[in-house]
Amino acid sequence: MIDVRRLKLLHEFAQQGTVAATADAMQLTGPAVSQQLAVLEREAGVPLLEKRGRNVVLTAAGRLLVSHADIIFGDLNAAESALAALKASGTGTVRLAAFPTAARALVAPMWTDVPGVSLRLVEGEPDAATALLHEEADIAIVHSYTLLPRPTPANCEVHDILEEPVLFALSAGAAARRGLAPGQKVRLARFAEDTWLAPSKEFSCNEMIQRACGAAGFVPDIVAEASDFSVLIALVATDAGVALVPRMAIPDGHGPISLHPLAAPVTRKVYALTRMGSARRPDIRAVLGRLGAHLAD
């Protein structure tokens, strides 16, 4: 049986890199740390550390055990947070981090729709939401594009929510001038000389547009950038330019615009990430079950 306190020492060693630094962080002596790690090796039955020059480093077995320790201690922290919230409010608390469109279209509609669960929300783009997962969030809602895949972080589980098309948007007047029927598929190369509207460069949606246009053989002339798709759609309606917009990002009452599927389709996958094993928690499982449910109602 592996002792959790010794596992904590190994986990700290992986963070600190040396026995001396681990001893300082844990307020122990260096010999005490070395002794406890040696006992942990005997409990594990395989070498966890090895000499490399003047340094001591983790073996493959040590790195494997540390990866499991990440999960164990993450779950312990989550359990402590959940118990504290339950004590304070009498309900379970689930903390979400979500990119803005998902916060509006997925989280807001189910805010009061999960009995016995209190929600907390932090808005953030996918990278920021994922970074919050191990410290400040139980669920990160993120996205990836077919042209811009996003790797799954280590020690995380993926929960699919929806897959949506990216649509081409132009003003209703521009569509009429081009002879485009409602819902007609378009080829992006036809709009190589148009002015384009795009999310700001720090957002992956900007890179998606650059890649889609690049695949069509041109570099888009971007005349306006914004952090909010609703701003881009408002500009499209005034005939300021054309844009590529995921369907869920199109606001209600969007004005006189024309939306078209792409002849070379681009899709956006929206999904939730949880720490490995944490989806077994009843409150997290309940929230995952409601995310996107209203879209099918």
Image: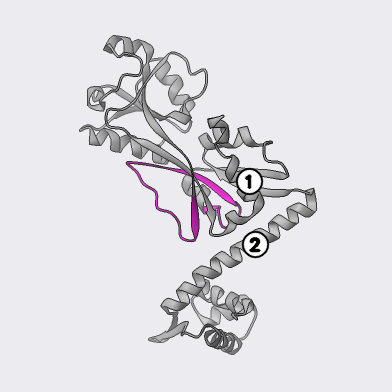
Residue 8 appears in the rendering: yes
Horizontal arrangement in the rendering, residue 119 relative to residue 267 (left or right)? right
For the N terminus, the image quarter is bottom right
Q: Residue 69: x, y in percent? A: 55, 70
Write down the region rendered in magenta.
131-158
- For the residue pair 24 and 178, the one nearer the viewer reads as 178
Indicate which disc, 1 or 2, sits on the residue closer to the N terminus: 2
Q: Residue 182: x, y in percent? A: 35, 15
Residue 239, compared with residue 91, is above or below; it is: above
- What's the residue at 66%, 49% (across, down)? 283
3D distance between C-alphas at marks 1 and 2: 20 Å
Most frequent secondary structure within the magenta stretch? loop
Amino acid type at image mark 1: Ala
Amino acid type at image mark 2: Asn
Residue 174, located in which quarter of the rendered image?
top left
Residue 52, compared with residue 106, is above or below; it is: below
Q: Which residue is mark 1?
A: 286
Q: Could you classify mark 1 by the number of other residues whose Cα lies within 10 Å: few (under 14), some (14-19), or many (20 or more)? A: some
Please state the total of marks drawn on the protein image.
Answer: 2
Q: Which residue is mark 2?
A: 77
Q: Residue 252: x, y in percent? A: 52, 21
SS at mark 2 in the image: helix
- For the residue pair 78 and 44, the one nearer the viewer reads as 44
